[in-house]
Amino acid sequence: MKLKMGEYNFKCRDVSESQKFYQEILGFKFVETEGDCVRLELSDKRILLMPLDKNEEPRITFDLMTDSVPEAKKKLEAAGYKTEDRKYEDWKFFAVKDPNGLEIEIIDEK
């Protein structure tokens, strides 16, 4: 199983207001819109501005891309970490929290 860094996910109260801040104030460049989300880039790093789900607070998560989601999930569960299956459009992936409670999403790189 190989892992590589993906993008950072910013869960926002207001995606439009956040986009304005990151683009106009901080100089991020627009990449694309994906549903209700907006992808921006600075240098070679990307962020995805996402609307909050119900009962959710603003937060930042990040993605790790893998060549084998099932293998990554099996390894984390064998080590005692709880995983949560997720789906967005046709993307299937899972989330896990590190020992500090920080959320990581493990996504198929294909």
Image (cartoon, rainbow, N blue to C red):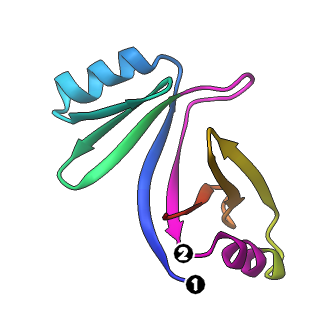
Magenta stretch, residue numbers: 51-76
Question: Closer to the camera, 69 or 55?
Answer: 69
The Cα–Cα distance between marks 1 and 2, rounded to whole angstroms, is 6 Å
- Locate residue 94: give its quadrant: bottom right
Give the residue displayed 17% in from the left and 52% down from the top. Answer: 43
Q: Which amino acid does label 1 sit on?
A: Met
* Residue occupying the point 18% across, 22% down: 24
Please tell me the numbered disc located at residue 104.
none
Establish if 95 lies above or below 75: above
Q: What residue type is labelled 2?
A: Asp
Residue 18, position in %: x, y? 37, 22
Is 22 above or below relative to 97?
Answer: above
Query: Looking at the image, which is closer to me, 84 or 71?
Result: 71
Q: Mark 1 points at which residue?
A: 1
Q: Which of 36 and 76 is in front in this view?
A: 36
> Label 2: which residue?
67
Residue 66 on image: x %, y %: 53, 71
Q: In which quarter of the image is residue 28?
A: top left
